[in-house]
Amino acid sequence: MPRLTQEQLIEIFNALKKEVQPYEKGNLRPRIDIQGKYDLWSEKPGMTLQGKARTEVSFVGLILQSSYVGFYYMPVYTNTEDIRSKLSPDLLKHLKGKSCFHIKSADKELLKHVKQAMKVGYEEYRKNGWI
């Protein structure tokens, strides 16, 4: 596969951002929203994560890299096996490490799987009282 151009990477980034941005509501807010980097954090007093009191929890992030767009999906840290079982095998093929998906295309099927992952993650955070 030939190396992606900067324009192609920006197109992928923007397509992913369109799937993530609808979740920018309530106490889910971006900390960074610039060309090539975007993230959402839950900011809510009184949250507990792994037995520790928190006022903020990362939800997702997008980062333009040199050969892919990193889709950082933090809900996997809440209940890894349960969350992963609800994600598409086609999306999981792009998972490198525990929470970073290396996205190299903006095809409709892959974006559909990202959209589903966002729903699953949002529901998990809602269930935990983080949003």
Image: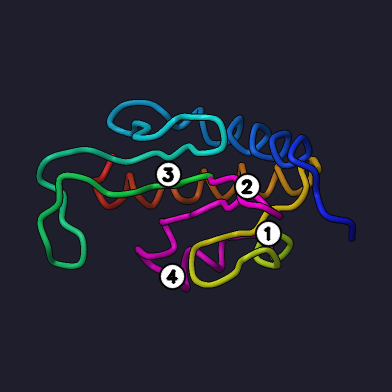
At horizontal 31% and vertical 26% (from top left) the residue drawn is 26
**SS of the residue under disc 4:** helix
Stretch of the chain drawn in magenta: 63-88
Would you say 68 lies left or right of 71 here? Answer: right
Query: Which quarter shows the C terminus?
Result: top left
* Amino acid type, label 3: Tyr
Name the residue beneath numbered marker 4: 80
Q: Which residue is mark 3?
A: 122
User: Residue 93: x percent and y percent?
Assistant: 70, 67
Query: How far, Cα to Cα, is label 2 from label 1?
Result: 7 Å
Mark found first going from the N terminus, 2 or 1: 1
Labels 4 and 3 touching (C-beta < 8 A): no
Q: Disc 4 marks which amino acid?
A: Thr
Mark before the other along the chain sequence, 2 or 3:
2
Q: Point out the tag, 4 or 3, that comes first from the N-terminus.
A: 4
Q: Nearer the viewer, residue 5 or 114?
A: 5
The kind of secondary structure element at disc 1 is helix
Looking at the rendered image, the disc whose residue lies closer to the viewer, 2 or 3, is 2
Evaluate if marks 2 and 1 touch, with contact meaning CB atoms under 8 Å apart: yes
- Sooner in the amino-acid sequence: mark 1 or mark 4: 4
Label placed on residue 114 = 2
What x and y, as percent, mark residue 46?
10, 45
Determine the CA span between mark 2 and mark 4.
17 Å
User: Residue 55: which quarter of the image?
Assistant: top left
Q: Which amino acid type is shown beneath numbered disc 1?
A: Leu
Q: Earlier in the sequence, mark 2 or mark 4?
A: 4
| Mark 1, residue position | 91
Q: Secondary structure at mark 3?
A: helix
The structure residue drawn at horizontal position 63% and vertical position 38%, both measured from the top left corner, is 16
